[in-house]
Amino acid sequence: MEMREQWRSRWGFVLAAAGSAVGLGNLWGFAYRSSQGGGLAFLLLYVLVVLLVCLPVLVAEMVLGRTTKSSPFLAPIKIAGSSWTPLGILFTIASIGILSFYAVIMGWTADSFVHSLFIGLPADMEAASGFFNRISTGNSVFVGQIFSLGLTALIVSAGVRAGIERLTRWCMPLLFILLLALTFWSATLPGAWDGYKTFLLNWDPSQLLEKTTIKNAFNQAFFSLSLGIGIMVAYSSYLDGNNQLPKSALRIASFDTAVGLLAGMITFPIVLSYGLQGAISKSTVGALFIALPTGFANLGGLGRVFATLFFGLAFIAAITSSISLLEVPVSSLMDRLGWKREKAVWTSTLVVFLIGIPSAISINFLGTMDAIFNLILMLGGLFIAILLGWIVPKRFDEDLSRSNSEIKVRRYLRFMLRWVSPPAIAIGLYASLTDFFL
Ligand code: PHE
């Protein structure tokens, strides 16, 4: 067995985990979910779910990785015996499944970037629909998907330090600068205030009890934090004992939420300024690929510059997430079967590619995959909460006390993990299931 790798620095871990969290889910997902009518109610529920339900689970997932020093596949078995094998399997299947369609959307993003840079953008909605049709059907989808997966595989095969940590150390600051620049620019658009008001600030308390809004808040929180899928297990297994996990988790969750909000503040002014609400309220990921390029195109040369920056930003955000998804099966194969990293990377990538073919061909299929795997994330989260809150609560507490987390914090987290997260996740699951089937 080779020595287990470790992060070079504490920030390396936090940036990599934040890189996993911040991704297309913040840029596309947040915008299309919040445009499904929830408005401020969605926002409020989302923040509550992140703070009260997800944060304790995030810490638990990190503890699971650090205390076992194992891959997501083996960690549940190591901590609680072989009856927990299904959880490791769930993690592995979920990360492969999500990456399979995530890479397709990454491909569309890359294509939009190339278009903004070299070719130009569609000027009206009709041209934009044609544009989206072109990038989302036929061979160009496969080109984008293969390119995205190939790049992801290359980075992951370079290893934790030389690949994942090095990339995220450069990309995350860059991403943040681009994001701020775009937010300021977007605030100067004529429809900026209307954009915020229509999508983010629109207050309708009855939405708080609306099933779709509840489902959206839970889905967005879990997907956006990369939670319940073993990524935080994998990343934390490369940590030494000193990191104060609750602090890191809070940093990651705050950063992720801030990026989601800023992304909304970028997209909605563009949509409102150019009367593109019609496209957005269709509420699929694709709608954004139609509305945003049109909005940018209406701004002439400058619009093209900002479009290039925006799609570049989106791709950077996506790649720091896709590498984390791939790391789950890769570390599991290395750990369970003793494979070399290279072999594990290319085998997993091939499997992901094959499973992704139906999503590349049909957007409806992609949407179904998205819905199914959002459910699985919550299920994973539920099991993590039960595992560390009820089955091995001592391990949870010991691990945190060894790294000097205060007793107050530990008590609070354990209480939430036992009494709040599981029932709340059950509500989220119920809302999602009934929304999916009824
Ligand atoms: N959190 C990432 C995003 O917001 C996507 C992701 C989901 C990554 C689940 C890993 C696991 O885009």
Image (spheres, rainbow, N blue to C red):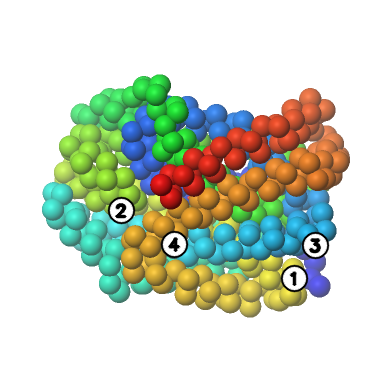
Which class describes the residues within 10 Å of circle 1: few (<14), some (14-19), or many (20+)?
Answer: few
Label 2 SS: helix
- Do the numbered discs 1 and 4 sit on residues whose CB atoms are within 8 Å? no
Amino acid type, callout 1? Arg
Say which element carries label 1. Answer: helix
Indicate whether 404 appears above or below 103. Answer: above
Kindly identify which residue carries mark 3: 82
User: What residue sits right under mark 4 in the picture?
Assistant: 101
**Mark 3 is on which residue type?**
Ser
Q: On the image, which quarter does residue 60 sit in?
A: top right
- Local secondary structure at mark 4: helix
Query: Quick check: 50 above or below 94?
Result: above
Alpha carbon separation for disc pair 1 and 2? 38 Å
Task: Write down the residue under mark 2.
Answer: 286
Which tag is nearer the camera, tag 3 or tag 2?
A: 3
Mark 1 beta carbon near ligand 1 (under 8 Å)? no
Which is more foreground, mark 4 or mark 3? 3
- Mark earlier in primary sequence (4, 2): 4
Spatial CA distance of label 4 from label 2 is 13 Å
Give the vertical position of 364 relative to 43 (above or below). Answer: below
Labelled pair 3, 2 in contact (Cβ < 8 Å): no
